[in-house]
Image: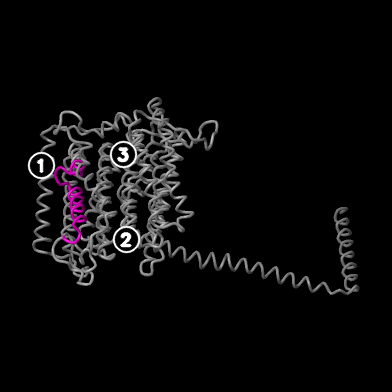
């Protein structure tokens, strides 16, 4: 089948699933609803594989023209190339596994059909973002994932205990993403003013042909695009929404924080690399913002006790590493880490969902322990995910992090040294999480322990698949020290088939340097693993209560008081301004003004109505009075005129 037809089918299937479940899903059995939603995702993944096999160059699929003027046109069109189809494979592949897991996890939820409607709609919007051939179509997908994430994060808004908190978390995510979206919208207007087109390929061609287009406006454009990426991909200062987004069901956390929404910012920068390569200042800003985000989030994760909050701050930290790679111009390395991160982070989130499901919705790791015997499949797969994200030798995260660290060493030894701290913290908080949850003795009480059980096969099967991908995912970009041919496959695939990526760097360091970097990273990870085992498994140290924490542990547990700081600097002043405007402008000016005008008109009417007596003599009097007045006026006027 032709590529254009496959792409249209691939896009239409999730939309069709959302339409069917959204309209008649309430009347269908849950198994059929889940089957429809998951089936369309699986078919989309198959279509993506077929397109992947046929992708040799860039193909533009024109749908229709939205706006056509003399100097520019805005088209609804799609672009199929190596970058877009690779991201499509990640979104549809991991998305399918999350859908399968959700059938078991959400089986007893009253909003089952709505949940799968939102999931399918979310995937459709993400695919639109990825496959759009211009910034206009990308913007539609960008806003689509924003509204769907709002609906999914606040999905349990009617919950008796946490409904208000869930709604606030959804609102927080929506508002903070709107800040980034404003940057994207301004960037689009600047691009249109500068290049008279929003098409990716046309902008890249114009830059190559006409060097005069390279001027100061490029910095403004790239900074606006980076602000947009900061919102979606949760970078400083717009990152505090993502940990709160854990209010959504766990499969939502896996979908949003692993392979889809949070990687949209990464994709935007990579897709716009022909602009960012002309703005070294912006790239430096990206690098250091990403570095700061990675460090701050890793520090905060060290003393979080909610299993999903640890993984959420881990996501923020890993996204920071990806932005460090982008700031160094290592775009394919960033996509490589996006890929491996999608595998092991989806595995960890779904694994945490399996634990929460077994623990009767309990998420505090201080009440867990010893679950490895009760949840053997969840334990083994979660261990693989933990080792992968920690950079354990020969697992997927080991290779992708090594690529980033290799570029960091080439860029600056100081950057490499400080970035290693973030990598070390990642291993520390992840091994702490693993040992507190699965080793030691159960700390949740006998009643809760009696209910702990392994999840259903429909939930454990996606865990096994993701665990396999987490083990072997690093082979996609295997370093050259292992084989003489076939290495750095992903980098070569993106470089040779994606328009505009010709300037991408690849880390082809000396074999001795690569081996040394791998040895250092491996040694550090193993030392931290031994330390964590000794403290949390052997000595059975338990996480302290919040009121017992002091020093850095208190700062970490309190999230550096960033939420309180934002509340003081932004939330409370805006609330005060809103209340003041309500009291003065709304009540005193608008309300009282409107009612005052109505009262004035009423009183005037009442006064005039008194003149309507119904007596003929009164009307004759006023007629004579009026005539005398008019005659007097004209007499006086003529006298003054003659004078």
Q: Is residue 381 magenta?
A: yes
Can residue 256 be spotted in the picture? Answer: no
* Secondary element type, mark 3: helix
Label 1: which residue?
A: 519
Residue 438 pos. (x, y %): 17, 60
Number of marks present in the image shown: 3
Foreground residue among 81 and 97: 97
Q: Residue at x 90, y 67 (%)?
A: 624
Give me the disc on residue 281: 3
Does 512 sit above or below residue 574?
Answer: above
Q: Name the main secondary structure of what is drawn in magenta.
A: helix
Picture coordinates of residue 144, whole percent (x, y): 43, 48
Establish if 335 lies above or below 148: above
Image quadrant in which the N terminus is located: top left
Position of residue 642 measured from the top left corner of the image (x, y, whole percent): 88, 53
In terms of sequence position, does the residue under pointer 2 or pointer 1 come before the other?
1
Q: Of the residues tagged 2 and 1, which is closer to the observer?
A: 1
Q: Are dots 2 and 1 in contact, CB under 8 Å? A: no
* Residue at image coords 27%, 47%: 320
The residue wearing badge 2 is 563
* Screen quadrant of the C terminus: bottom right
């Amino acid at each position: 089948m032709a590529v254009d037809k496959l792409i249209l089918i691939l896009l239409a299937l999730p939309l069709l699933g959302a339409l069917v479940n959204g309209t008649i899903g309430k009347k269908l059995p849950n198994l059929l609803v889940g089957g429809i939603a998951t089936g369309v995702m699986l078919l989309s993944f198959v279509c993506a594989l077929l397109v992947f096999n046929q992708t040799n160059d860039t193909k533009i699929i024109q749908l229709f023209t939205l706006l056509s003027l003399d100097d520019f046109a805005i088209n609804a069109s799609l672009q199929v190339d190596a970058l877009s189809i690779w991201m499509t494979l990640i979104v549809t592949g991991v998305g399918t596994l999350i859908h399968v897991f959700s059938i078991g996890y959400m089986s007893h939820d009253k909003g089952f059909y709505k949940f799968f409607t939102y999931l399918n709609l979310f995937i459709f919007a993400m695919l639109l973002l990825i496959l759009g051939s211009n910034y206009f179509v990308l913007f539609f997908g960008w806003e689509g994932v924003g509204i769907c994430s709002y609906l999914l994060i606040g999905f349990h808004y009617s919950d008796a205990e946490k409904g208000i908190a869930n709604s606030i978390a959804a609102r927080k995510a929506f508002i903070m993403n709107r800040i980034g979206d404003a940057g994207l919208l301004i960037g689009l207007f600047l691009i249109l003013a500068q290049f008279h087109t929003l098409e990716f390929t046309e902008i890249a061609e114009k830059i190559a042909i006409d060097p005069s287009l390279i001027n100061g406006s490029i910095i403004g454009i790239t900074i606006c695009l980076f602000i947009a990426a900061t919102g979606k991909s949760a970078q400083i200062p717009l990152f505090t929404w993502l940990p709160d987004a854990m209010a959504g069901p766990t499969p939502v956390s896996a979908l949003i924080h692993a392979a889809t929404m949070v990687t949209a910012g990464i994709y935007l920068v990579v897709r716009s690399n022909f602009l960012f390569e002309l703005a070294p200042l912006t790239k430096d800003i990206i690098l250091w913002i990403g570095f700061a985000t990675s460090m701050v989030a890793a520090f905060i994760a060290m003393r979080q006790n909610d299993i999903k909050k640890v993984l959420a701050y881990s996501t923020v930290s890993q996204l920071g590493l990806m932005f460090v790679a982008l700031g160094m111009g290592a775009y394919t390395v960033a996509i490589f880490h996006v890929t491996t991160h999608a595998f092991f982070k989806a595995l960890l989130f779904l694994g945490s969902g399996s634990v929460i499901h077994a623990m009767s919705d309990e998420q505090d790791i201080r009440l867990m322990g010893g679950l490895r015997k009760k949840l053997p499949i969840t334990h083994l797969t979660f261990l693989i995910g933990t080792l992968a994200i920690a950079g354990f030798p020969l697992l997927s995260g080991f290779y992708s992090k090594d690529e980033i660290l290799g570029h960091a060493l080439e860029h600056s030894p100081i950057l490499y040294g400080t970035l290693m701290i973030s990598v070390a913290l990642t291993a520390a908080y992840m091994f702490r999480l693993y040992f507190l949850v699965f080793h030691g003795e159960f700390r949740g009480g006998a009643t809760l322990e009696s209910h702990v059980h392994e999840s259903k096969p429909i939930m454990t099967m996606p865990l096994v698949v993701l665990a396999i991908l987490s083990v072997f995912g690093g082979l996609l970009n295997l370093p050259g020290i292992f084989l003489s041919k076939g290495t750095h496959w992903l980098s070569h695939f993106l470089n040779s088939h994606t328009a505009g990526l010709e300037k991408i760097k690849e880390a082809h360091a000396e074999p001795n340097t690569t081996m040394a970097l791998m040895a250092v990273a491996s040694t550090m990870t193993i030392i931290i693993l031994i330390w964590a085992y000794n403290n949390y498994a052997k000595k059975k140290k338990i996480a302290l209560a919040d009121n017992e924490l002091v020093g850095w542990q208190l700062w970490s547990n309190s999230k550096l008081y960033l939420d309180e700081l934002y509340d003081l600097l932004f939330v409370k002043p805006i609330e005060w301004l809103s209340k003041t405007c309500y009291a003065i402008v709304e009540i005193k000016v608008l309300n009282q003004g409107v009612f005052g005008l109505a009262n004035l008109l009423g009183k005037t009417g009442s006064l005039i109505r008194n003149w309507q007596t119904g007596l003929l003599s009164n009307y004759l009097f006023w007629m004579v009075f009026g005539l005398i007045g008019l005659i007097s006026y004209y007499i006086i006027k003529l006298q003054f005129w003659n004078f």
